[in-house]
Image (tube, rainbow, N blue to C red):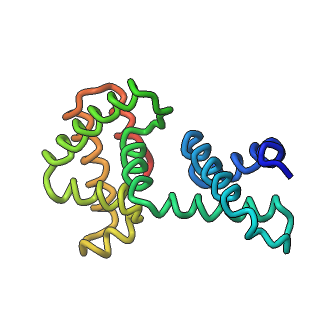
Amino acid sequence: MEIEQIIAEHGDYLLKVAYLYVKNEATAEDIVQDVFIAFYQKQQQFRQESSLRTYLVKMTVNRSHDYLRSWKSKRLSLFEKIVGRTTTITPEKELLAKSTKQELVAALFTLSVPYREVLILYYFEEMTTVDIAKLVHCPEATIRTRLQRARKQLASIIGDDDWEVLRYESI
């Protein structure tokens, strides 16, 4: 079977599978492209113990997991969670995002340690408020209050109306 036919037959389905994991269309497309390249380079290793679709889906799931464990994924996730929006990357948007990230990091470091700490643990480490409370030895209600205040301070530092959404994001 030709690679073009395999791509035509399975590409859309694999894209949906990857998207369900990474929740970003551009990243999902990259993952599917990597899967097809890897399959093309090593198709002689496919032993036909399962269907080709099953084999490609398994490769896609594994690549998606690899991406989600990667540093790049965690950085992007932190930025998107704090900003509250996703981006389709173009050179212009990438430059704007880089500028916004620098502004965000600068603003983050102006916060006091307790506020900065909860934001980093909650968004970057993806810890729950219960886990953060255990880690820093204080009540969970205090953590929720710190998160709310940290979001509010960050929004006022950035001075952008879009940042006001952070104040009302549920914990």
- The residue that appears at 27% across and 35% down in the rendered structure is 155
Is there any visible trace of residue 169 in the rendered image?
yes
Give the quarter of the image for residue 7.
Answer: top right
Q: Position of residue 96 (x, y in %)?
A: 33, 28
144 with respect to 136 (left or right): right
- The residue that appears at 28% across and 59% down in the rendered structure is 118
Q: Position of residue 16 (x, y in %)?
A: 71, 47
51 with respect to 44 (left or right): right
- The residue that appears at 13% across and 45% down in the rendered structure is 110
Towards the viewer: 14 or 84? 14
Q: Is residue 36 above or below residue 87?
A: below
Towards the viewer: 30 or 170? 30
134 with respect to 112 (left or right): right
Give the quarter of the image for residue 162.
Answer: top left
Q: Position of residue 45 (x, y in %)?
A: 73, 70
Towards the viewer: 78 or 18? 18
52 with respect to 136 (left or right): right
- Count of numbered circles on the image: 0
Towards the viewer: 61 or 35? 35
Give the quarter of the image for residue 26.
Answer: top right
Is there any visible trace of residue 23 in the rendered image?
no
Q: Position of residue 156 (x, y in %)?
A: 22, 33
Q: Is residue 6 above or below residue 102?
A: below
